[in-house]
Amino acid sequence: MPGGTVSLPQLVDWLSRFSGLVTENRTYLTELDSAIGDADHGANMARGMTAVMEKVGATPAAAVDELFKSVGMTLVTSVGGASGPLYGTFFLRFGTAAGAVTELDGAALGAALRAGLGGVVARGKAEVGDKTMVDAMVPALDAFDAEVTAGADAAAAASAAFSASTMGRDTTEPLVARKGRASYLGDRSAGHLDPGATSTTYLFQALGEALA
Ligand code: ADP
Ligand code: MG
């Protein structure tokens, strides 16, 4: 990571690793979604991220905002479930916040991730404790920002974010879902990990690996 910044190719590598992780774990994500949803989260994420990588490969972007606009639009339009528009909005806001640049330092990356979370919350209206992807994203971004504030580089911050996201994912198991399809189950949604919080851990695992 020369000069402590994250380059455009590293951001593409992040997306590629995320695509790989959701594809490798698609059966597991679908199992989680069959317990409290409609058994399509693995298929939704794998299809969406495969479409993203095809698009990114066919039309290489010159700047971070351009890359993530294309990523976000592809997810919003290629995934039928709630997760497509939610992850799509995350990446759209990420790109807008990052701007027409070709690299990001740790603080700028943290700000872009935070803007992405803002998009998820604006669209889905979930709070921490509602048993959604927000339960993994919020602790991840808090850990990322704490590392950057303490002087760590983006790679160390991303690794801390991944670890925090797994703890956030685990908090969803006993919760009763208050948002999304799982909320239709009421109390029966308790006792299962949230699928979207689980795919969010792959987002941060992928980031940590791309920046390492
Ligand atoms: P669908 O629920 O439409 O079948 P997916 O199965 O792909 O879509 O995604 C389900 C995941 O989406 C949930 O596990 C949860 O993490 C996330 N989710 C659903 N609704 C919301 C919401 N309002 N805000 C944030 N995340 C949500
Ligand atoms: Mg589903």
Image (cartoon, helix red, strand yellow):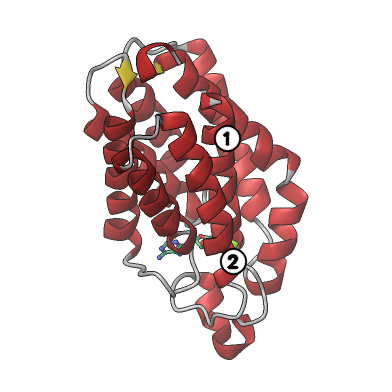
Q: Which mark is residue 194?
A: 2
Which is more N-terminal, label 2 or label 1? Answer: 2
- Which of 90/110 is in front? 110
* In-image side of 2 versus 93 (left or right): right
Residue 93 at least partly seen: no
Q: Amino acid at mark 2?
A: Asp
Question: Element type at marker 2?
Answer: loop
Q: Residue at x 29, y 37 (%)?
A: 112
Structural crowding at the residue carrying mark 2, measured as other residues with C-alpha within 10 Å and reported as few (<14), some (14–19) or many (≥20): many
Question: Element type at marker 1?
Answer: helix
Q: Residue at x 52, y 63 (%)?
A: 168
Q: Amino acid at mark 1?
A: Ala
Relative image position of residue 200 (x, y in whole percent): 53, 50
Q: Residue at x 51, y 25 (%)?
A: 211
Q: Which residue is mark 1?
A: 206
Relative image position of residue 175 (x, y in whole percent): 54, 80
Q: In terms of image quadrants, where is residue 97?
A: top left
- Which of 174/88 is in front? 174
How many angstroms separate mark 1 from mark 2 (CA)?
19 Å
Relative image position of residue 131 (x, y in whole percent): 50, 71
Q: Is mark 2 within 8 Å of ligand 1?
A: yes
Residue 72 at least partly seen: yes
User: Does residue 93 lie above or below 171 as drawn?
Assistant: above
